[in-house]
Amino acid sequence: MGNCDHQYVRRGAGLILRSFLAACAATAGLLGPALAAECSENAVTLRGDWGQARFSVEIADDSAERAKGLMFRESMSTAAGMLFVYDRPQPMSFWMRNTLIPLDLLFIDSRGVVQHIHENAVPLDETPIYGGENLLSVLEINGGLAKRIGITKGTELRHPAFAQGNPAWPC
């Protein structure tokens, strides 16, 4: 995706990333009509009192993919992220070893509900970032984006990874 301008629109108590310019909206699908799209392995949709947002995601669902994560990347599209998915709920802790860009880490339970957000994780920092107990997944997005959009604890995610856990927002 190329460089696209963003438009922020107030909705409720927070700001939401409304859409890219028309040319970008069709490919990015961050917000707007693309939200009506069906669940897909390569996209996650979030909703809360603040509105909705959609990210294209890479899935890290085995030990090798989870170990590499977003290491060594110098940038990531605003409408992109990485969804780490585990086989069963468990305590989770992440670090930023060899990660060059600041990230927001959204720690998610088996129902697809955000339980904790760590904002602006510091690149290359090896200090463990504890997300909590009983977590199934972590969504990594660009640092500062969760706050700008208005994503909070309790935000619900829609993705097939949560189908087995009595999802809060089913596909």
Image: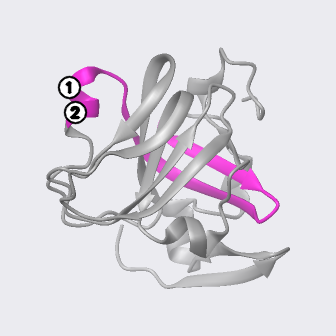
Image spot of residue 56 (x, y percent):
47, 50
Residue at x 69% of width, y 28% of height: 111
Q: Position of residue 75 (x, y in %)?
A: 26, 66
The residue to which callout 1 is attached is: 64
| 121 vs 30, nearest the viewer | 121
* Residue 57, image quadrant: top left
Residue at screen point 49% across, 85% down: 5
As for residue 133 lying within the magenta part, the answer is: no
Q: Does the segment drawn in magenta span residue 49? A: yes
The region drawn magenta spans 42-67
Image: 35 above or below 12: above
Q: Position of residue 144 (x, y in %)?
A: 47, 72
Report the colour scheme: one colour
Q: Quadrant of the C terminus?
A: top right
Mark 2: secondary structure: helix
How many residues crowd around disc 1 within 10 Å: few (fewer than 14), some, or many (20 or more)? few
Q: Which residue is the site of mark 2? A: 67
Q: For the residues labelled 1 and 2, say whether their Cβ atoms are less than 8 Å apart.
A: yes
Q: Residue at x 28, y 47 (%)?
A: 95
